[in-house]
């Protein structure tokens, strides 16, 4: 099958209405605000950015892909990073850079796992900013590793920005299978203390309970 080639920004795939919306999201914080206002999806399938705009629903994976498509249109690339967790869902981030530092746009069902300002000099530094806020309903801190950045332009042949197909298998599986770097050792895991009640309750403000992982 001949691989499709899109322009660097991918503008040619969008309708006029879609372009108006995406062009209005010309800053990462505006993309984050759009995702924050979008209801959290409990569906198992993964929507393309076109479906996110149409359905006005998203979970972390399709929210990250929507953010990547919007960032791409504004010349910021379309890179994702997967956070690996145990006894919990993985979490997917849309990466961007400013002034040589990393930030992320992120759709999450819990408050601490969303936007990060572009102030992190390394990816590890960025990832570790999620550590204390990454926990399950049993108050266990669950973050264990992170992937290398994945450029979604490698999936342009799948029309990932506009397809009606479920993207969980081709893209979600790739993010799961790519090499991950551990963030803590087994000895550190054994020393972790549970999340305190005040932190737990503050993280759950605005959560959709149906979308929470149950160990």
Image (tube, rainbow, N blue to C red):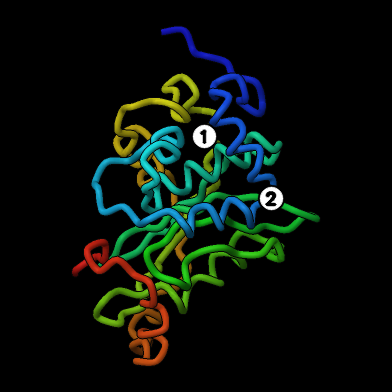
Q: Which residue is mark 2?
A: 27
Residue 89 - label: none
User: Residue 99 at what x, y percent from top left?
Assistant: 80, 55
Quadrant of the image for the N terminus? top left
Q: Earlier in the sequence, mark 1 or mark 2?
A: 2
Quadrant of the image for the C terminus? bottom left
Name the residue: 30% across, 74% down. Answer: 136
Residue 152 - label: 1
Residue nearest the observer in this picture, 151 or 23: 23
- Cβ atoms at labels 1 and 2 below 8 Å apart: no
Q: Whole-Å distance between the Cαs marked 1 and 2?
A: 19 Å
Height in image: 111 above or below 90?
below
172 relative to 214 in the view: left or right: right
Name the residue: 41% across, 40% down. Answer: 52
Crowd class of label 1 (few under 14; some 14 to 19; many from 20; radius 10 Å): some
Crowd class of label 2 (few under 14; some 14 to 19; many from 20; radius 10 Å): few
Name the residue: 36% across, 77% down. Answer: 204
How many numbered marks are there?
A: 2
Height in image: 78 above or below 5?
below
User: Residue 190 at what x, y percent from top left?
Assistant: 33, 84
């Amino acid at each position: 099958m001949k691989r499709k080639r899109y322009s660097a920004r991918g503008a040619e795939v969008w309708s006029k209405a879609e372009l108006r919306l995406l062009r209005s999201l010309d800053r990462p914080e505006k993309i984050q605000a759009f995702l924050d206002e979008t209801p959290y999806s409990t569906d198992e399938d993964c929507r393309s950015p076109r479906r996110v705009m149409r359905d006005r629903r998203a979970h972390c994976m399709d929210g990250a892909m929507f953010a990547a498509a919007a960032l791409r249109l504004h010349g910021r690339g379309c890179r994702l990073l997967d956070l690996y967790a145990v006894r919990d869902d993985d979490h997917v981030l849309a990466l961007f850079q400013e002034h040589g530092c990393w930030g992320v746009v992120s759709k999450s069902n819990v408050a601490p796992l969303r936007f990060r300002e572009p102030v992190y000099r390394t990816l590890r530094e960025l990832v570790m900013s999620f550590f204390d806020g990454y926990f399950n309903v049993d108050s266990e801190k669950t973050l264990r590793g992170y992937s290398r950045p994945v450029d979604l332009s490698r999936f342009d042949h799948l029309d990932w920005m506009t397809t009606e197909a479920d993207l969980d298998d081709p893209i979600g599986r790739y993010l799961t299978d790519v090499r991950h770097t551990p963030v803590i050792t087994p000895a550190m895991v054994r020393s972790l203390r549970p999340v305190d009640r005040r932190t737990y309750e503050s993280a759950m403000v605005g959560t959709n309970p149906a979308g929470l992982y149950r160990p």
